[in-house]
Image (tube, rainbow, N blue to C red):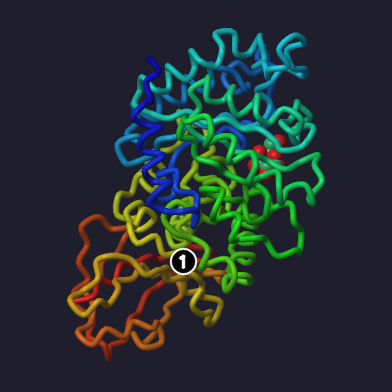
Amino acid sequence: MHKTSPAVIVLLLLQLLHCGHALENGLARTPPMGWMSWQRFRCITDCNKFPDECISERLFRRHADLLASEGYADVGYEYVIIDDCWLEKARDNKTNKLVADRTRFPSGLNALADHVHNRGLKFGLYQDFGTHTCAGYPGVIDHMQLDAQTFADWDVDYVKLDGCNANVTDMTEGYPQFGRLLNATGRPMVYSCSWPAYLEDAYPDYESLIKHCNLWRNWDDIDDSLESVFQIMDYFAKNQDSIQPQAGPGHWNDPDMLILGNYGLSYDQSKLQMAVWAVLAAPLIMSNDLAKVEPRVKAILQNRDIIAVNQDPLGIQGHRLLVQEYIEVWRRPITPKNDDQEYSFAVAFVSRRTDGKPYGVTFSLKELLLTNSKGYSVQDLFEPKSNLGVYEADSQFSTRVVPNGVTFYKFTAL
Ligand code: GLA
């Protein structure tokens, strides 16, 4: 007798409940968290020269193990995602199926998925909507149904679909179609769409993105530098009136990977990216060598209070509220709401200053649009268990921010 799996029944029930308003595959109710290869390991394929760094099953097994053993899984990092350069250059000439590189993934993707799943983690894979991936491996365009089914057969839980080597006009139909094909397999797979990043200046079809994708890359790739982090922040701030309202449970804007733990950011700059990504309700997908992250940077990545801001159940994305004297204020409404339904807020003060001292700024709570009449109790999110006391509605708030650094607070509505 044909048995319907519990996952399919849940999916069907969810679809019935939410007749087509959003992609209700039940996934990514909070921004996905995990680890992905691209930013740190790019397309290193020479495993003889670089055995610890090449895109191979060894790299992903190692990182699944490290997520579990180094405490990352305990705080929520879940997906182990293979980015580009995992494929053979040609499909199987009999079945047309995609084939993982035989030398670098000798055990096959099912065995790798098992390894990841056995550590309580989930397994993600990169592909591309066009004829070829950005690095030149075969894309999905003429084999979408076959590839969606192959992903399901490989026990994939997360698909990043890039948009190189494709006609942008085909994406309007193509990205939704691939999402429907993933759903039709009956295997729940988070669907990450790079579609808007390929539109250049055209306005993304957010209605369609929300309906078909769990997250989407809004803009350019992150690089290993503060300059790159700032460029992305500026893009999000400049376009925040259109970007910010699109986020919510099941559908997120993606400013790209966390680069903490690599070469480009100082300790304070690492805090800065973590804080702003929490305000932006961004997917927290690290790309680094988890064996080499220094302890104090690991503590930032594992800061439970900041992760709680990022994962806030309301799922309201924050935005840049104001800029004064090169100090930017980024603010996000979060739980708990008080009895009068006033939100609490996470507020980050980001310094774009480079004059060499911690710079002091003072704002009235009104300037920060913190208008709850009973005031707020305040916590420094980088100081575990800190309690800065109660700030009344008519009070002032002062903070000192180091050059290219951040301070980050939770204002809990009383
Ligand atoms: C594009 C994407 C990156 C990465 C590379 C892989 O540039 O935006 O995130 O996936 O392709 O080639």
Residue at figure coordinates x 68%, y 31% from the top left: 144
Q: Is residue 223 above or below residue 277?
A: above
Rendered-image quadrant of the C terminus = bottom left
The image quarter in which residue 336 lies: bottom left
Quarter of the image where the N terminus is located? top left
Residue 362 in sight in this render: no
Helix, strand or loop for disc 1: loop
Q: Nearer the viewer, residue 201 or 25?
A: 25
- Nearest the camera: 227 or 353? 227
The one nearer the camera, 297 or 212, is: 212
- Where is residue 194 shown, x and y percent of the image? 65, 47
For label 1, the residue is 402
Neighbours of disc 1 within 10 Å: few (<14), some (14-19), many (20+): many
- In this picture, residue 206 sits left or right of residue 8: right
- With 26 as the anchor, is 354 left or right in this view? right
Amino acid carrying mark 1 in the image: Val
Q: Where is residue 147 in the image (x, y as percent from the top left)?
A: 64, 26
Which of 214/241 is in front?
Answer: 214
Picture quarter containing residue 33?
Answer: top left
Q: Relative to 187, does residue 168 appear above or below in the rendering?
A: below
Q: At 33% from the left edge and 66% from the top edge, which residue is drawn?
A: 334
